[in-house]
Amino acid sequence: MSPEISPHRRGEAPADPCGIAECPEPSARSVARSAAHQAFPAVADEAGRVNLCRTHYKVYKKSTRADRALARLGRY
Ligand SMILES: [Zn+2]
């Protein structure tokens, strides 16, 4: 019986870099690509998730606040 310690605890920032092109910041959150595409056209509108740094996450939240507020409660 080996103890399993998950490296991904909810609420903690992953170590991956920001998914926005040419952004040097470390990622703070990951969001759905289709949703990020609305805020950042450079992000491909496809399935999966993309990492965002704190700065880009703020921009993302501003542009998606209205329709993501309810969905977020169910996803996190
Ligand atoms: Zn960024």
Image (cartoon, grey):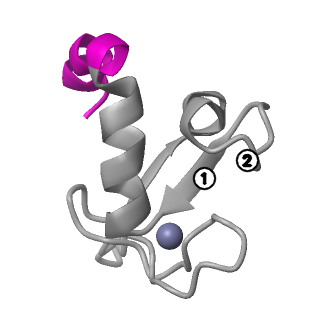
Displayed quadrant of residue 16: bottom right
In the rendered picture of this protein, how many numbered marks are placed on residues? 2
Q: Is mark 1 within 8 Å of ligand 1?
A: no
Q: Residue at x 60, y 52 (%)?
A: 50
Q: Residue at x 32, y 67 (%)?
A: 54
Residue type at numbered disc 1: Val
Q: Position of residue 4 (x, y in %)?
A: 33, 72
Compared to residue 6, the image places residue 31 above or below, namely above
Q: Residue at x 72, y 70 (%)?
A: 21
Task: Looking at this view, name the residue that lies furthest to the bottom.
Answer: 24
Displayed quadrant of residue 47: top right
Q: Which residue is mark 2?
A: 43
Quadrant of the drawing holding the N terminus: bottom left
Compared to residue 66, the image places residue 35 above or below, namely below
Q: Secondary structure at mark 2?
A: loop
38 with respect to 10 (left or right): right
Q: Which residue is mark 1?
A: 50
Q: Nearer the viewer, residue 11 or 19?
A: 19
Q: Nearer the viewer, residue 62 or 13?
A: 62
Q: CA distance from mark 2 to mark 1?
A: 8 Å
From the image, give the main secondary structure of the stretch colored magenta. Answer: helix
Displayed quadrant of residue 62: top left
Q: Residue at x 24, y 68 (%)?
A: 12
Dot 2 or dot 1: first in sequence order is 2
Residue type at numbered disc 2: Val
Q: Which residues are magenta?
A: 66-76
Labels 2 & 1 near each other (Cβ < 8 A): yes
Label 1: how many Cα within 10 Å (few below 14, some 14–19, many 20+): many
Q: Please state which of the two labelled residues, at mark 2 or mark 1, is closer to the viewer.
A: 2
